[in-house]
Image: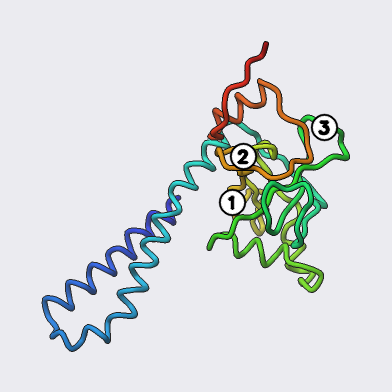
């Protein structure tokens, strides 16, 4: 969050500074010369700003779910028959099911997901890249939402945090689901962690 805040301030200042310098000190003929850097600085400012909602969602999830360390997590690049959405996926243990049942979560296309997409990859992905996903950190409930991360180099702390969610957890139309519905307690916990789901009557 701190790095993102610094980045937002720096790129915004770069855009404003270039625009001010162009208007105050240079002739209109220099506009085309500065257009690429102005556009890029504006783009980076928007990207940095767009990270904050996701960061607050991750923080909220981490307030209600502890980290789990998982190894040999199934993953793939093809369509998963039990996933609510299409895309590259990972499977996480079902909190209400047997030890052998897992729930798929897909990575929604986003500029911050490129690192994950490159490391999950397919059969041609280098073993060194795949190894960076071991062990996998997970906080959340895969039936609703969660945060994944990998271990930092020379440290046991998580890094590369990424927010994942099921479309149905935010009121979107869900496709086929290959797992059981959650009970009232689990649904309430997910709701407090940020999921937009209707309350379930315990009765």
Q: Give the percent coordinates (x, y) of residue 80.
A: 77, 53
Left or right of 13 in this view: 7: right
Q: Check disc 3 and report the residue beneath it.
A: 97
Give the camera-side residue of 124 and 153: 124
In this figure, which colouring scheme has been used for the structure? rainbow
Q: Give the percent coordinates (x, y) of residue 27.
A: 13, 85
Q: Secondary structure at mark 3?
A: loop
The residues tagged by marks 2 and 3 sit, at their Cα atoms, a distance apart of: 19 Å
Left or right of 124 in this view: 203: left
Mark 2 touching mark 1, by CB under 8 A? no
Q: Check disc 1 and report the residue beneath it.
A: 161
Q: Is residue 131 above or below residue 72?
A: below
Q: Earlier in the sequence, mark 2 or mark 3?
A: 3
Q: Earlier in the sequence, mark 2 or mark 1?
A: 1
Q: Quadrant of residue 182?
A: top right
Give the camera-side residue of 83 and 17: 83
Of badges 2 and 3, the one in the foreground is 2
Mark 1 touching mark 3, by CB under 8 A? no
Total number of numbered discs in the rendering: 3
Q: Quadrant of residue 14?
A: bottom left
Residue closest to the far top:
203
Q: Check disc 2 and report the residue beneath it.
A: 168
Q: Secondary structure at mark 1?
A: strand
Q: Earlier in the sequence, mark 1 or mark 3?
A: 3
The residues tagged by marks 1 and 3 sit, at their Cα atoms, a distance apart of: 26 Å
Of badges 1 and 3, the one in the foreground is 3
Q: Give the percent coordinates (x, y) of residue 185.
A: 66, 21
Left or right of 29 in this view: 84: right
The residues tagged by marks 2 and 1 sit, at their Cα atoms, a distance apart of: 22 Å
Q: Is residue 171 above or below residue 126?
A: above
């Amino acid at each position: 969050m701190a790095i993102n805040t610094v980045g937002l301030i720096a790129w915004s200042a770069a855009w404003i500074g270039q625009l001010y310098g162009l208007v105050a000190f240079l002739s209109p003929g220099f506009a085309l010369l500065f257009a690429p850097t102005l556009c890029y600085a504006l783009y980076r400012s928007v990207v940095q700003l767009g990270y904050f909602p996701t960061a607050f969602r991750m923080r909220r999830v981490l307030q209600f779910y502890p980290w789990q360390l998982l190894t040999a997590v199934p993953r793939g690049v093809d369509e998963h028959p039990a996933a609510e959405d299409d895309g590259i996926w990972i499977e996480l243990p079902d909190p209400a099911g047997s030890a052998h049942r897992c729930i798929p979560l897909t990575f929604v296309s986003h500029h911050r997901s490129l690192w994950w997409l490159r490391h999950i990859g397919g059969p041609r992905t280098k073993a060194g890249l795949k190894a960076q996903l071991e062990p996998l950190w997970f906080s959340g409930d895969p039936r609703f939402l969660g945060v994944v991360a990998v271990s930092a180099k020379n440290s046991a702390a998580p890094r590369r945090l990424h927010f994942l969610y099921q479309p149905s957890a935010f009121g979107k139309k869900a496709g086929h689901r290959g797992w059981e519905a959650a009970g009232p307690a689990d649904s309430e916990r997910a709701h407090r962690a940020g999921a937009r789901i209707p309350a379930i009557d315990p009765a």
